[in-house]
Amino acid sequence: GYMAGMAGLFFGEDDARPATLDGKPADLENWGGATVSDHHTFIVRYRPDEDRHLDMHVDECDVTFNFGLCNPDSFKGSDLAFCGMFGSPEHRKHLHTYAHVKGRCVLHSGKRRHGALNVEEGERASLIMWTKSPAFRRTATYQRRWGNQAVIKPESGTPDRVCLSYTHDRDFHKLRQTLGDATGVMPEPKM
């Protein structure tokens, strides 16, 4: 179906994936995209007076589909910041920031670090579809990247502030002292 077709194009077998996207190296890996057969779908919503953002994280899936549900003129902020892949030396290096567009789908590996920056005005909602490939999860490749045989490579250089996670990074408070605060990546203090 559609899930496996699109996921397979970008996160399937080596011969199916493009080497470049828009003239730049695609840096795509096989995450079982051609064999996704399971999904969990839900809606997320960000508002200044409720859930303002989503801290940096990786998803509990192999390939994520993120569909914009709101007109871009109905909210301000709440961009998606993408960083490196789980376990890579660049996992806390900023790669791209994406501004949502209604009806457009962002497709990414679930193991790519990402987060939603603070929404400043209005409301942004997205339909999220986490897809999994049980067949790929049984492979040695999956076990080396994410499973019990995963090797976490040493980090290369100083992380980018936007890629830090106050939830998942044990060194967050230490790095925060060095790198400072950044708008949109930490909740406001509660009074």
Image (spheres, rainbow, N blue to C red):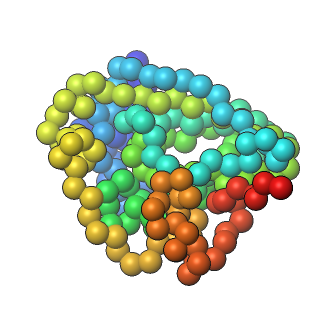
Rendered position, 108 above or below 4: below
Residue 46 on image: x %, y %: 74, 41
Residue under the point 40% across and 61% down: 91
In the figure, residue 19 lies in which quadrant? bottom left
Rendered position, 4 above or below 94: above
Residue 9 on image: x %, y %: 36, 37
The quarter of the image holding the C terminus is bottom right
Residue 15 in view in this figure: no
Residue 179 in view in this figure: yes
Residue 49 on image: x %, y %: 84, 44
Residue 17 on image: x %, y %: 31, 44
The furthest residue to the left: 140
In the figure, residue 190 lies in which quadrant? bottom right
Residue under the point 55% across and 69% down: 173
Horizontal side, residue 98 vs residue 4: left or right: right
The furthest residue to the bottom: 178
In this view, the residue in front, 165 or 69, is 165
In this view, the residue in front, 79 or 179, is 179
Residue under the point 49% across and 49% down: 57
Counting every numbered tag in the picture gives 0
In this view, the residue in front, 76 or 179, is 179
Residue under the point 63% across and 77% down: 180
The quarter of the image holding the N terminus is top left
Horizontal side, residue 10 vs residue 138: left or right: right
Horizontal side, residue 164 vs residue 69: left or right: left
In the figure, residue 5 lies in which quadrant? top left
